Image (tube, grey):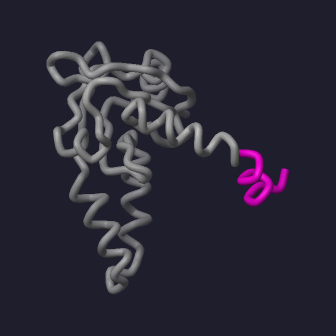
Amino acid sequence: MFYGEFLHNIDRKGRLIMPAKFRDVCKEYAVDRFFLTRGLDKCIFMFAEDEWRSQEQKFKNMSFTKKETRSFNRMFFAGAVDVLPDKQGRFIIPPYLKDYAGIKRETIVIGVSNRIEIWNKKSWETYYADSNDSFEQISENMLDI
């Protein structure tokens, strides 16, 4: 559903604009509401509402008697906020999520199929450089194509 990598800046009013390709996908699938939360690798996860509900159900079915489950759910759901982008596709990222991801102004917005990730530009560049060299090895270990 969401694919690609885009450079965008937080504007003076603290808003981020969704990439035009993602806005087109939203129109096609009638998506208008999203959920943002703490992602892995110090990025922000952004889910369309339907996908958020699907992920939420998976986590609700995990046993809360396990310490790791409780810990993950606390971080994931306590950090969650719903956003409704305006007609130009702009939305505000709460300060605590920007702090978590180290975002000041420059961001990289990437599509990862069922979710969008919002990264601090330098963090993404570091992650990409570190992962690029091992991409083929990772694919050999996990894929059987």
In terms of image quadrants, where is residue 75? bottom left
Q: Where does the image place residue 16, in percent across and percent down from the top left?
A: 29, 23
The chief SS type of the magenta part is helix
Q: Where does the image place residue 127, in percent across and percent down from the top left?
A: 52, 42
In terms of image quadrants, where is residue 23? top left
The residue nearer to you, when weighing 11 against 31, is: 11
The residue nearer to you, when weighing 20 against 53, is: 20
The residue under the point 50% across, 33% down is 125
The stretch drawn in magenta includes residue 140: yes
The residue under the point 38% across, 44% down is 43
In terms of image quadrants, where is residue 20? top left
How many marks overall?
Answer: 0
Is 13 situated left or right of 139 in this image? left
The answer to whether residue 27 is above or below residue 95 is above
The answer to whether residue 82 is above or below residue 90 is below
Query: Which quadrant of the figure contains the N terminus?
Result: top right
The residue nearer to you, when weighing 65 against 120, is: 120
Magenta-highlighted residues: 135-145
Q: Where does the image place residue 141, in percent across and percent down from the top left?
A: 76, 60
